[in-house]
Image: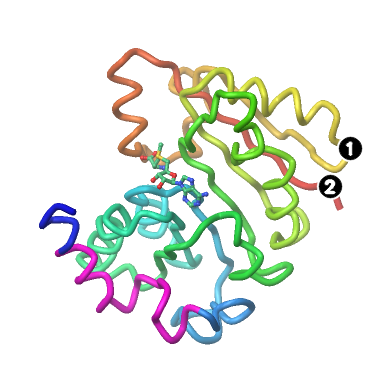
Amino acid sequence: MSRTKLKRFTEISERHNVLEDNKPLYQQLKGNWNKDYFPKDQPITLELACGKAHYTTGLAAEFPDRNFIGIDVKGDRLWVGSTIALENNLTNTAFLRAQIEHLDQFFDQNEVSEIWITFPDPRPRKRDMKRRLTSPRFLELYKQVMKPGGIVNFKTDNTQLFEYTLELFEDRKDIELIDHTFDLYNSPLNELHYGICTDFERKFKEKGEDIKYLRFKFKA
Ligand SMILES: C[S@@+](CC[C@H](N)C(=O)[O-])C[C@H]1O[C@@H](n2cnc3c(N)ncnc32)[C@H](O)[C@@H]1O
């Protein structure tokens, strides 16, 4: 392991705003985020596969009246979001080191108001379909923790993953697709993003990829 990674792991192990295994609060968060972690009881937004958590920190600065949690398995990436939050006194943020597969262990029913899924790994192989973050197994998890009417936003460069998701929704009676675009930067929907650009998004844009975006909600 590189020295930078090691240093970051040590630092996040001592930080209040990173929740990871072996910290006392980690096992006690389900249903208690607004009571035991955040200073203010406010609607909670999750950023899944957040990496350096640009949406978590960007939206938290934009919306002080909401709470934001970036979730990823990689501690060195969460360190970046955690550092931005500390430097900017974003007390309405948290960084959770966990597998999205375990979302229901960390959030109670109706605890989450909004979800962002930002540039998840596309998992193009057929045998990895179940691991796509918009596959039915993950949709069930999101549905379990979300408040009725809560919106899920999904942003990707990957056309195959985007089309897979749109096709899946055609057969889902419980999902209402609100908006979608294959070219976010030339769409009025870009206003919903407050100029936030993630690390992977920047890389894909430089390669000339169009950014795709959709948002949907689970019907009551
Ligand atoms: C392609 S990166 C995108 C990161 C960031 N959203 C961005 O746009 O820069 C995908 C991220 O998903 C995380 N990830 C992949 N599978 C995951 C899982 N099952 N649970 C939690 N995080 C996961 C990876 O660690 C990685 O940081």
Q: Please name whichever residue, 216 or 119, is drawn nearer the observer in this view of the structure.
A: 119
Residue drawn at (77%, 31%) of the image: 169
Q: Is residue 218 magenta?
A: no
The quarter of the picture where the N terminus appears is bottom left
Total residue callouts: 2
Label 2 CB less than 8 angstroms from ligand 1: no
What span is in magenta? Answer: 7-26
Q: Report crowding for label 1: few under 14, some 14 to 19, many 20 or more residues within 10 A (C-alpha).
A: few
Left or right, 63 with reference to 87: right
| Residue 45 rendering spot, x and y as whole percentages | 54, 59
**Mark 2 sits on what residue?**
219
Label 2 packing within 10 angstroms: few (<14), some (14-19), many (20+) = few
Amino acid bearing label 2: Lys
Residue 110 % position (x, y) = 72, 67
Q: Residue at x 85, y 43 (%)?
A: 174
Verify CB contact (< 8 Å) between mark 2 and mark 1: yes
Q: Secondary structure at mark 1?
A: loop
Q: Amino acid at mark 1?
A: Lys
Q: Which residue is mark 1?
A: 173
